[in-house]
């Protein structure tokens, strides 16, 4: 297992419902170990096993939930 942490800026989240939608979508991805969402800061922090998933899949999951990942 190769644990990594990604801190991602996300646009469009405004409430707890938004946070739950993002967390629910990311929890579906194999390899994601934990998800922490800060609506106030517009960030998503994800601990994941890089042998099971990658940053692109995580960003796609955020997009699937209906939110936009900000460019680095």
Image (spheres, rainbow, N blue to C red):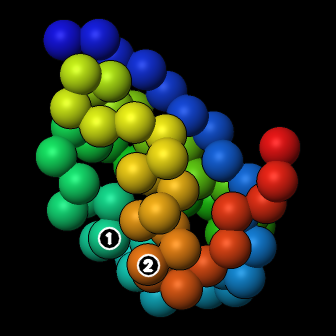
Task: Give the answer, above or below, for where 19 lies relative to 30.
Answer: below
Q: How many marks?
A: 2
- Number of the label disc, if any, that sits on residue 64: 2
Is there CB contact under 8 Å for labels 1 and 2?
A: yes
Q: Is residue 1 left or right of residue 68?
A: left
Q: Marks 1 and 2, how far apart in space?
A: 7 Å
Instruction: Confirm whether residue 55 shows in the render.
Output: yes
The spot of residue 25 in percent (x, y) is 32, 70
Residue at horizontal 44%, vertical 71%? Answer: 22
Residue at horizontal 29%, vertical 37%? Answer: 53
Q: Quadrant of the C terminus?
A: top right
Mark 1 or 2, nearer chain start: 1
Residue at horizontal 44%, vertical 78%? Answer: 64
Q: Of all residues shown, which one is farthest toward the front?
A: 56
Q: Residues within 10 Å of mark 1 (few under 14, many from 20)?
A: some
The spot of residue 27 in percent (x, y) is 25, 58
Task: Give the answer, above or below, for where 53 lies relative to 29.
Answer: above
Task: Give the answer, above or below, for where 64 lies relative to 31.
Answer: below
Residue at horizontal 20%, vertical 62%? Answer: 28
The spot of residue 30 in percent (x, y) is 16, 46
Instruction: Confirm whether residue 41 shows in the render.
Output: no
The spot of residue 3 in percent (x, y) is 33, 16
Q: Quadrant of the N terminus?
A: top left
> Foreground mark, 1 or 2?
2
Q: Is residue 7 left or right of residue 19?
A: right
Q: Is residue 72 left or right of residue 17?
A: right
Instruction: Name the residue carrying label 1.
Output: 25
């Amino acid at each position: 297992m190769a644990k990594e942490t990604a801190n991602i800026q996300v646009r469009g989240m405004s409430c707890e419902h938004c946070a739950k939608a993002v967390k629910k979508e990311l929890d579906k991805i194999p390899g994601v170990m934990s998800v922490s969402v800060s609506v106030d800061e517009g960030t998503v922090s994800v601990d994941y096993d890089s042998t099971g998933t990658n940053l692109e899949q995580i960003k796609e999951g955020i997009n699937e939930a209906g939110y936009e990942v900000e460019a680095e």
